[in-house]
Amino acid sequence: MDWVAEFWIPVIKAVVLVVVLLLSGAYATLWERKICGRFAVRYGPNRAGPLGLFQPMADAVKAIFKEEFIPNHVDKVIYLMGPGISYAAILITFAVIPFGPEVNLFGKQVGLWIGDVNVGLLYLLAIAGLGSYGIVLGGWSSNNKYSLLGALRAAAQMISYELPMGLALVSVVLVVGSLSVRQIVDFQGG
């Protein structure tokens, strides 16, 4: 019976994390639109629900039923796979980030993170580098040399940002003495 909990608890945590990330992105966009509306001396989105709180759901329904335009000359599988790879890389990075201490859930100690990898910082840097593959695939699948050049340039820019980010994290690793993100957060907490 213990193996059932060992299997389902990470699955449930992953599903909750994805739902929370999607909803937080949707509502961050809503508040951004409302703030931009205030700057322009108008209300912003306020029609769907009280104060426009259902606007993200209306936007999702609109996006689902929107016509998907794919140019004729593209490699369709790779063209559709590129944005998915970039988005998946973003979501996967949140797996090792601890969102709080361990909590007691039905008599079992459950950590508010999906996985505690002992080389979590290296994992974060490696997965962040995977996001550039989606951009390169998008440019390559379009069968246009200028799109490919632009995608390669954007990917090179993304990869070049990782070196300073990694060097900045070296000081954290030296102070804490661990690459585990959970141990780094515990060290910050005292």
Image (tube, helix red, strand yellow):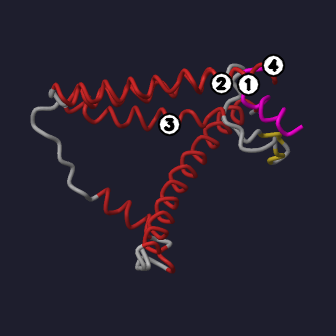
Q: Amino acid at mark 4?
A: Gly
Q: Amino acid at mark 3?
A: Ile
Q: CA distance from mark 2 to mark 4?
A: 12 Å
Q: Amino acid at mark 1?
A: Ser
Name the one closer to the observer, 101 or 133. 133
Answer whether labels 2 and 1 touch (C-beta < 8 Å). Answer: yes
Name the residue beneath numbered marker 1: 180
Which residue is rendered at x = 67% and y = 25% of the image? 169
The disc, 2 or 1, on the residue closer to the chain's N-terminal end is: 2
Name the one closer to the observer, 33 or 138. 33
Q: Amino acid at mark 2?
A: Leu
Neighbor class of circle 2 (other Cα within 10 Å; few <14, some 14-19, many 20+) is many
Callout 2: helix, strand or loop? helix
Name the residue beneath numbered marker 3: 90
Q: CA distance from mark 2 to mark 1?
A: 6 Å
Answer whether labels 2 and 4 touch (C-beta < 8 Å). Answer: no
The disc, 3 or 2, on the residue closer to the chain's N-terminal end is: 3
Which residue is rendered at x = 9% and y = 37% of the image? 72
Name the residue beneath numbered marker 2: 121
Percent across and percent down for residue 51 are 50, 79
Q: Farthest residue toward the left? A: 72
Q: Which mark is residue 177?
A: 4
Percent across and percent down for residue 58 are 38, 67
Magenta run includes residue 94: no
The disc, 1 or 3, on the residue closer to the chain's N-terminal end is: 3
Total labels drawn: 4
Q: CA distance from mark 3 to mark 2?
A: 14 Å
Callout 3: helix, strand or loop? helix
Q: Which residues are magenta?
A: 177-190
Callout 4: helix, strand or loop? loop
Q: Quadrant of residue 145?
A: top left
